[in-house]
Amino acid sequence: DAMVIQNPRYQVTQFGKPVTLSCSQTLNHNVMYWYQQKSSQAPKLLFHYYDKDFNNEADTPDNFQSRRPNTSFCFLDIRSPGLGDAAMYLCATSRDRGAQNTEAFFGQGTRLTVV
Amino acid sequence: KNQVEQSPQSLIILEGKNCTLQCNYTVSPFSNLRWYKQDTGRGPVSLTIMTFSENTKSNGRYTATLDADTKQSSLHITASQLSDSASYICVVVREGGGNKLTFGTGTQLKVEL
């Protein structure tokens, strides 16, 4: 059974048109992460939530925002997508963030295409 | 700088053969090392997690080793299957880093008939 669910799997958006990607989890984990993965590259952490506490990475563009209305859901908002934002967006969760062996569970990803 | 480097970048093997993938890291202080399998167009799936005190860990046909002194890890795949074709990513977690994952760029494995 899927534990981290991302919707949609594929998203096509127009240049400059706001788009929202969705992630939900059934694990009741405290931490939710958003990663951007471009072709043949390692995933890059954009930000994460520890419960309601938002933690932005220093090099994440302002164009990327996130919301976590409750434990189960987390959204990635791209305010004005550019061609360079086309990528796979991965959501992940973990029970905690400080302990060793805290497993991270990834969703299937959303492939974003900007036209 | 905290980095994770993997080799080879890509690998092609015949079905039924074994292979070993390498991972070197400079992440410090070290907390744990993970190997993930990522199928094309999918999210990564965890294979193994090893802490400082663990030298080897197996998950079916996958066996990971860790040498924390030399900061090296390997993933050995036994009796490869076509379904093993994927990217294998080494990930290192820094102690006190808030479980932040440092990813390698992966080894792209293709298993052929």
Image: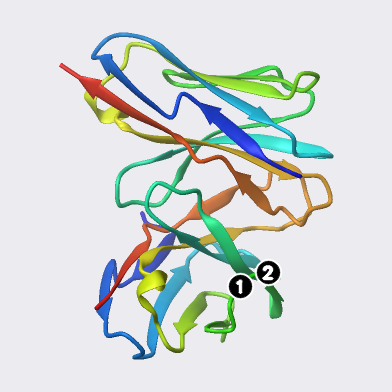
What's the chain of the residue with tag 1? Answer: A
Q: Is residue A86 above or below residue B108?
A: below
Looking at the rendered structure, the kind of residue marked 2 is: Glu
Q: CA distance from mark 2 to mark 1?
A: 5 Å
Q: Amino acid at mark 1?
A: Thr
Which residue is labeled 1 in the image? A60
Left or right of B109? Residue A77 is right
Check the image and name the residue furthest to the top.
B17
Q: Residue at x 64, y 49 (%)?
A: B101
In the rendered structure, the answer to whether residue B96 lies left or right of residue B24 reads: right
Q: Which mark is residue A89?
A: none
Q: Is residue A103 above or below residue A113?
A: above
Q: Residues within 10 Å of mark 2 (few under 14, many from 20)?
A: few
- Give the residue drawn at x 41%, y 13%: B19
Pick the quarter of the image with the N terminus of chain A.
Answer: bottom left
Residue at 64 percent of width and 47 percent of height: B102
Viewer-proximal residue among B108 and B31: B108
Q: Which quadrant of the structure image shows residue A7? A: bottom left
Name the residue located 54 percent from the left edge and 30 percent from the top edge: B6
Q: Quadrant of the C terminus of chain A?
A: bottom left
State whether residue A109 is above or below residue A50: above
Q: Are callouts 2 and 1 both on one chain?
A: yes
Does dot 2 land on a helix, a strand or a loop?
loop
Within 10 Å of disc 1 (Cα), the crowding (few <14, some 14-19, many 20+) is: few
CB atoms of marks 2 and 1 within 8 Å:
yes
- Camera-side residue of A22 and A63: A63
Q: In the image, residue B59 lies at what x, y percent?
A: 49, 24
Residue beneath disc 2:
A57
Q: Position of residue B16 (x, y in %)?
A: 27, 10
SS at badge 1:
loop
For residue B22, side relative to residue B66 (left or right): left
